[in-house]
Amino acid sequence: MDFTGKAVLVTGATSGIGAAIARAFAGVGASVLLTGRDAERGERVAGSILAAGGTVAFGAADITESQTPGNLVQACLDRFGRLDVLVNNAGVIYDGTAEETSDAEWLETMAVNLDGAFRMSRAAIAAIRQAGGGSIVNVASDWALVGGRRAVAYCASKGGLMMMTKAMALDHAHENIRINAVCPTEIDTPMLDREIERAGLTREEALASYGDKIPMGRVGTTQDVANAVLFLASDDASFLTGVALPIDGGVTAA
Ligand code: NAD
């Protein structure tokens, strides 16, 4: 896979899956604009990509602010002269049934996971078209495909993201802009660490117990997700659009 000459924008890339996606794209020659809220963490990820010989820039931004999408797309054009691939990865999760979920938790989940991805995609389409086509990859969840307990806002937001993926895929197929989603199950990231903390388990107990529920017997790695995102964004997937690709060791096969 070769992304030399291509520019990629990754949201929520200061940790976990997003950082792995940014590293993976840089590793195959792409120029990467990574973004997230935490400047210190973002500069650290960008520094490690630079040290490995990659081409990278970091822009601190909150995806829920109205100016962010336009500013980020412009920053990518200013820095790299083009935008070929957008990865909507920023996400939050709150634990809770409907009765336990506050308005603030529901609204923040939608603002980041769904509205943020929508507004980033809307802002990016013209630049991707200008580049002669390209793709958007949305990081959804296995809970975009099946329900999960005690995560009502998250499931609703990721289900919406999945349907937005399909609708946009239809709207932009004729101009060679492909829009796909990955649907990971439990992946070993800071988001999972926070879930482990809430459950009051040790890391080893938690990884073993989550792994037991996955047909392939382990939780996923950030590299598992990054590999799939790269594939969907690459020419190897040139006839794939509107796809929900589970990265789940078989969970949603059942
Ligand atoms: P993470 O907490 O390490 O990463 C989430 C990223 O989103 C962080 O960089 C965070 O700063 C960023 N973010 C959150 N709110 C933001 C905002 N308002 N503006 C800008 N950035 C914001 O967790 P992760 O596991 O790496 O999650 C990445 C994506 O993968 C999320 O969309 C998550 O829903 C999805 N996902 C994770 C898992 C898992 O088990 N870890 C499973 C399925 C899907």
Image: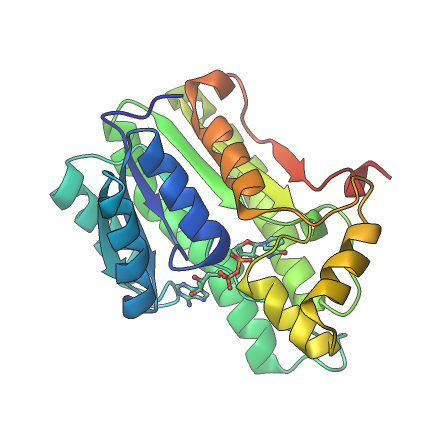
Residue drawn at x 63%, y 36% is 244
State the residue at coordinates (29%, 51%).
Answer: 48
Percent of width and height locating residue 238:
47, 18
Is 104 drawn above or below residue 82 in the view shown?
A: below
- Residue 77 quadrant: top left
Identify which residue is drawn at 65% across, 46% down.
220
Note whether residue 88 is visible.
Answer: no
Mark yes or no: residue 148 visible: yes
Q: Residue furthest right?
A: 254
Residue 177 percent location from the top left of the image: 40, 27
Residue at coordinates 44% horizontally, 51% vertically from top-left?
A: 18
Judge left or right: residue 99 versus residue 182: right
Colour scheme in the image? rainbow
In front: 61, or 117? Answer: 61
Percent coordinates x, y for residue 108 in the rendering: 52, 72
- Where on the picture, by quarter, is residue 134? top left
Q: Quadrant of the N terminus?
A: top left
